[in-house]
Amino acid sequence: MLERDLLFNQLVGLAANTAVEVLFFLAGFAQAISFLQSCNSSPSFFNVITHTLKRIIKLEFFYAINLLVIVYVFRSLGDGPTWYFFDKLMAPCDKGIWSNLLFVNNFVNNFGSKEDMCLPWTWFLAVYTQLSLIAPLLVYLMTRIMMICYPAIILLGLVSLAITGIQVWVLDCGVNSSYDITYWSNVYTKPW
């Protein structure tokens, strides 16, 4: 029984480490299809700009409302013996909420730094938004210059692997985001 539980925990743990990568892949694929459908399969640079602006405005509006409610309204709603955990979690937001509103919180004040990031679980949305800024431009370039489409995808993949490998080597950290805070804050939560 214990062996089965340990095996289950190991399998779930291994799957959980790749869940974010799979979600990024699926979101990128869906965004590429959405972009191509919105410009009737023949994108122009104007389509790239309008699609990107619509996406940023849509994300920013709801994200800003959530941030403001969580950071400024929730503080006055609670009290009790464990409320100091919430106050401690919200303390970095006094200085760092601007990085969340600009979707750069995964680059500014990482986990484990002297000034932790405001709402640390929102690193995912920052990376998603940064990739959403790049995706329409890449799809546009790949529809215009089809001959370099596959080599460009392979090159981008190899460059991404090389950057990650160099960072892991320079930082001398492991590649398991569950156990290594250096890997988590300097490699995993970045958009490369």
Image (tube, grey):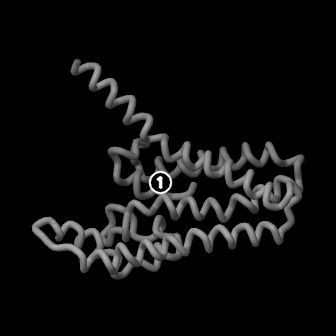
Q: Percent position (x, y) of residue 10?
A: 35, 30
Residue 172's place in the image compared with 140, above or below, is above
Q: Depth check: 162 or 170 in front?
A: 162
Q: Is residue 122 left or right of residue 114?
A: right
Give the residue type at disc 1.
Answer: Val
Q: Position of residue 144 (x, y in %)?
A: 89, 56
Residue drawn at x 58%, y 64% as measured from the top left: 129
What residue is at 55 percent from the left and 47 percent from the top? Answer: 23
Mark 1 element type: helix
Q: Residue furthest front?
A: 77
The quadrant of the picture occupied by the C terminus is bottom right
Residue at the disc numbered 1 = 187
Q: Residue at x 27, y 68 (%)?
A: 89
Q: In the rendered view of the protein, which quadrant contains the N terminus?
A: top left
User: Could you tell me which residue is drawn at 77 percent across and 55 percent down?
Assistant: 139
Q: Locate residue 4, reporting x and y percent.
A: 29, 20
Label 1 crowd (10 A; few <14 / some 14-19 / many >=20): many
Total number of numbered labels? 1
Quarter of image, res 72: bottom left
**Between 58 and 141, the one nearer to me in the picture:** 58
Q: Nearer the viewer, residue 155 or 26?
A: 26
Residue furthest left in the image: 81
The quarter holding residue 35 reads bottom right
Q: Is residue 178 visible?
A: yes
Image coordinates of residue 91 in percent, x first then y, are 28, 76
Q: Tell me: residue 30, above or below residue 35.
A: above
Figure check: 123 above or below 74: above
Q: Is residue 68 left or right of residue 58?
A: left
**Residue 31, quarter of the rendered image:** bottom right
Decide if residue 165 is in sight here. Answer: no
Q: Is residue 16 left or right of residue 154?
A: left
